[in-house]
Structures are given as structure tokens and as C-alpha cells.
Amino acid sequence: MAHPLKKLMSQTAIYGISSILGRMLNYLLVPLYTELFVPAEYGVVTDLYAYVGFLFVLLTYGMETAFFRFAESEKDKEKVFTTAISPLFITSTLFIIGIIFFSENIAEIMRYENNPEYIIWFAIIIGIDAFTSLFFAKLRQENKALKFATFKFINIGLSIGLNLFFLLLLPLLVKYESFSFVKTIYNAEIGIGYIFISNLIATIVTFALFIPDFFKIKYSFSSSLLKKLLIYGLPLLFAGIAAMTNELIGRVLLKYITAIPENITDAKEYAMTQVGLYGANYKLAILMTLFIQAFRYAAEPFFFSQKDEKNAKKTYADIMKYFVIFGLTIFLGIMLYIDVAKYFINSRYWEGLKIVPILLLANLFLGIIYNLSVWFKLTDKTNYGAYLAIGGAIITLVLNFLLIPEIGYLGSAWATFACYFTMMVASFFLGRKFYKIDYEIKKIFIYFILALVIYFVSLEINFSSEITNYMLKTLLFISFLAFTFYKEDLISKFKNF
């Protein structure tokens, strides 16, 4: 295995400590949420965090990737950073002020007229996160993965701790007379609001961690460099918004266009229940989502650092192949043991399990798209990234509007699948025209077919003995691993790694 791959794997592993392990700890709150809150209440959490994705992309407007691009080519990396951070500070500040000013109007439009404070809290969270995103990008560009991981852990750990404090400890203490003082800081009516308060406090603390770094920076600004950053990054803004549309719009639209059965008296509660079911079951794709997130953190700066190497394209092709193998392993690991994995959420959410395999594959396609994106990022053709994402967004919107009224949140899942599959295919063929990489398509296709065959065979395993069922599914899982190890000769490669 080539040295560049070893470097990427080590970086992915370190980022994975903060991204995969840290976020997994955060995801472990989902069983708590689904236990404490009915689907309609959890639907509020799913709905509001969907807007976070859109607004974060809007407020960072491609500046992270633009920073990576020009930090590699410009001699004065500090100037690139300070030039990029300046507009982020201005736009984030204006966003927070503007949203606070119009919070009641926005809350009414979003059907949260009784809780305008949610809008204010999220404005602060999103604004601060957008600003600090470039500080985290700087750590990645400087290969300071340990510091990156530490700050991420502090953020996640604090958020988890505060959730447990507000949702478990305080409700327990308030029952005892000796802890009557707790009533002065705890209000049961806030309910899911404590999830947002925990996030807000953790976000503010994370911002404070970067203050010493901020004052150490030697400020330098270049208007010509800013123009380059914006020209490079703005197409990524449109691509990012489109990407968020692809990923999140279904959760937003479910609230508005879900068909309400005639026997339902509370339409709003029913719609939010559908959102909650979709959001909770989406969490069962956790391992795929977190793997892709960790890979993306490590891969983006890595791709730029390798672009001038002699065997760069071979490296990119190898990365794609091993990425797919690992992604398919996660898919099978979850789906073959879905009867165990489903206990991650409360049983009242299980009716939505049917969307899990669809979303797992959809997210795997998304990860492949991230791999393929190397062609337009390295050739400075980021406008094609925008075209691809916008095309995907159109597919997502059309299919959501067509399918949600007919089959509810299942339609949203299929829309996501169709979108990412189409984008993946289109990006592959465009990449062959502008920056051809000889991916091992035949092998990748074989691995996909094998994984799908194993999955569909597993659906037919239904013996009266659960032990027998799990033994057979485990044999199927091992057979996939054995085949890939044999086909790739991974044992000998690991020996030489």
C-alpha cells in the first residue's frame, strides 16, 4: 500500500476519533430522546436541525474549500486565512443580529409561534459555527489533527453532559424536597428546548477556545486575494445549498406536504410525527454518515496536497476502491443485524425501519461523490460541482413533491437515493472528460453486486431460532469480508503497510 494512503488513513483515524467516536457519543443521545419524547416532539428537533444544514452552508459560502485551495498555492498562508475570516466574521454577525430582530416573524412562518426563542438560539449557534468553521479548517490544513480532535471532543462532551444534566439529572432532583432549589433553574415545560440550550452553551464555549488563537494572528488583508477566494468558493456555495437540499429538504417538506388521513384530528401533530419517524430512523445510518464525515475531513486537504505527485491519480483510484469496500462493509454490518440495531431507537419509531437500507446506500453514493469531486476541485472547475448539485436538488425536489403525498417519508428516502445515484453517475462521466482517473470500476461493481446479493439473501433467513438466524447472517458477513480480502490481497498488503 502506497505511503500517501497510509498518511490519509492515519489522518482519517485521528479525525475519526473526534468525528466518528465523538459524534457517536452524541448520537447515543438519540435513544434518550426517543425514550423521553414522542415522535411529534422529536420531529421538532429533526426539523430545526435540517435548517441548520442549509444556513451553515449559506454562511460559509465555500470559504473552507477555497482556503484549502489557496493555502496550498500562496506563500503567505496567514494572509489567506485572515483574508478569508474577515467576511465570515461580518456576515455571521449580521446574520445573528438580523435573525434576532425578526425572530417572531420567522417563528410564525415556521409554525413555532409559541417558541420564538428557538429561532434566536439557533441563530447564535449557526452564526458562531460558521465563523469558527475556518479556524477548524486551519487546524486541518496545518495537520493539527490532535488539537482539532480535542476541541471537537470538548464541544461534543459538553453538549452531551448538558443534555444529561437538563433531561435526566434535574428532572430526577426536582422530585426531592431537599433539592427544591432546582426548581429555580429547571422548567419541565421547556422540554426539547433543553436540547437546543445544551448545543448553544457548547457552541459558545468552543468559540471561546479559539479566542487565544484569534489574538495570535498577524492580521493581513488582500482584496485581490479575497476576490480569488470568492470566485473559487461561490460556486461551492450553490453546490453546498443544493447538496443540503438533497440531504435535508425531505425533512422540511414532510411537515408541509404529508398527506393527512381523514381520521386524523390533529394534522400538525401527525405531520411532525412523520418528521420524527424519518429523523429517528435516519440516525440508524449513523456509522455510514460518520465514516463519510471523518473521511471528508481528512480527504479534502489530502487531495490538494497530492495533486502534484507522480502517482496522484493512482492514489485517488485506490482510495475510491477501499472507500467503497469499507462503505459496503458498514451497509452489511447494519442491515444484517438490523434486529439488534433497531434497539438504538424506541420501539414506537420502528415502523420507519424500512427507510434504513435506502438511506444507507444513498449515503454511500454521497461518499463516492466526495471521492469523485477531486476532478473539479483540482482543475478549478468548481462551477461543475454546482451544476451537479443543482441538478441533484431539482431531482430531489421533484421526487419529494411527487412521492411524499403518496408514500410519506418513504418517498423522501427514495428521492435522496435517486438524487445521489444520479449525481454519482454524472460526476463520474464528467470527470473522465476533464480529469480522467482510472477507477477500478469492474471490481467496485462486483463488490456492490455481492453486497446486495448477500443483503437480499439475508432477508429470506427466517428460522424459528434467532441464534441460527444470526449465525447464518454472520457467515454471510464473513463471506463478504473474505472475498474482498482475497480479491485485494489485503493480508499481504497489510504486512507491508
Image (cartoon, rainbow, N blue to C red):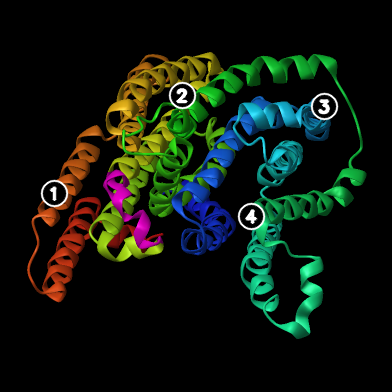
Q: Is residue 6 above or below residue 320?
A: below
> In terms of depth relative to the viewer, which is nearer, 136 or 377?
136
Q: Which residue is mark 4?
A: 195
Q: Amino acid at mark 3?
A: Leu
Please state which of the two labelled residues, at mark 2 or mark 3, is closer to the viewer.
Answer: 3
Could you tell me if the residues under marks 1 and 3 are in contact, i.e. CB atoms within 8 Å?
Answer: no
Task: Give the amino acid at mark 1.
Answer: Phe
Query: Circle 3 is placed at which residue position?
Result: 94
* Residue in the picture at 55% in, 24% down: 241
Label 1: few (<14), some (14–19) or many (≥20) C-alpha neighbours in 10 Å: few
Residue assigned mark 1: 456
Residue drawn 41% across and 29% down?
Answer: 372
Question: Which label number is shown at residue 375?
Answer: 2
Q: Is residue 38 left or right of residue 487?
A: right
Q: Is residue 446 magenta?
A: no
> Label 2, label 1: how many angstroms apart (C-alpha)?
34 Å
Q: Residues within 10 Å of mark 4 (few under 14, many from 20)?
A: many
Q: Nearer the viewer, residue 473 or 261?
A: 261
The nearer-to-camera label among 2 and 1 is 1
User: Which of the marked residues, 4 or 2, is nearer the chain's N terminus?
Assistant: 4
- Residue 207 seen in the figure: yes
Helix or strand or loop: what does disc 3 sit on? Answer: helix
Q: Earlier in the sequence, mark 2 or mark 1?
A: 2
Residue 131 x %, y %: 76, 37
Q: Where's residue 387, x and y in %?
A: 47, 14
Q: Is residue 66 visible?
A: no
- List x then y, in percent, for residue 206: 76, 52
What range is drawn magenta here? 345-357
